[in-house]
Image: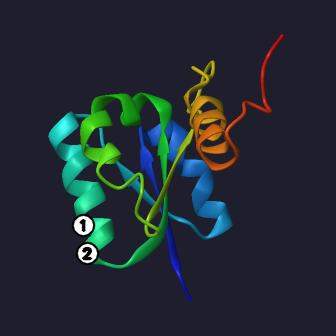
Amino acid sequence: MSKVGVIGDKDSVMGFLALGIDTFTAYEPEEIKKTIHRLIEEDYAIIYITEQASLLAKDYIARFKDEPLPAIIVIPGIGASLGLGMNEIRESSKRAIGVDILFND
């Protein structure tokens, strides 16, 4: 069975424990990068990462954008969403089909 993990601040990731998802708290850029690297080494198929944490490791995460695994998925943390996850979905769909089907007008 594939492993799933979530990275972010404590308040944002704790709820995922109830779903059986492995949680990892990380606050600093290097800590976030090391956690992602560790999860990749441990064969995690899906890595959810909060928007705030993804901003701190943006360049590192970009390395895995075109890889089939792991799927690194940006999710909102506690508080207001920055819209990063939706922007990634929008960009992926534009690359795949050549048009923005999720436009916000």
Relative placement, left or right, of 2 versus 66 is: right
Please give the name of the residue rendered at 59% of the width and 33% of the height, measured from the top-left corner: 76
Query: How far is the residue under mark 2 from the one under mark 1?
Result: 5 Å
The numbered dot on residue 38 is 1
Q: x%, y% of residue 47?
A: 47, 59
In this rendering, the answer to whether 32 lies above or below 44 is above
Relative placement, left or right, of 97 versus 6 is: right
Please give the name of the residue rendered at 44% of the width and 41% of the height, measured from the top-left corner: 10
User: Which residue is more in the foreground, 88 or 25?
Assistant: 88
Report which residue position mark 2 lands on: 41
In this rendering, the answer to whether 39 lies above or below 12 is below
Q: Quadrant of residue 90?
A: top right
Q: x%, y% of residue 24?
A: 38, 55
The numbered dot on residue 92 is none
Q: Residues within 10 Å of mark 1 (few under 14, many from 20)?
A: few
Please give the name of the residue rendered at 22% of the width and 48% of the height, measured from the top-left corner: 33
User: Which residue is more in the foreground, 10 or 91?
Assistant: 91
Q: x%, y% of residue 5?
A: 47, 63
Dots 2 and 1: beta carbons under 8 Å? yes
Q: Name the amino acid type tagged 2.
A: Glu
Element type where label 2 sits in the image: helix
Q: x%, y% of residue 18?
A: 66, 62
Q: Quadrant of residue 100?
A: top right
- The count of marks equals 2
Please give the name of the residue rendered at 56% of the width and 66% of the height, measured from the top-left corner: 21
Q: Name the amino acid type tagged 1.
A: Arg
User: Which residue is more in the foreground, 80 or 70?
Assistant: 70
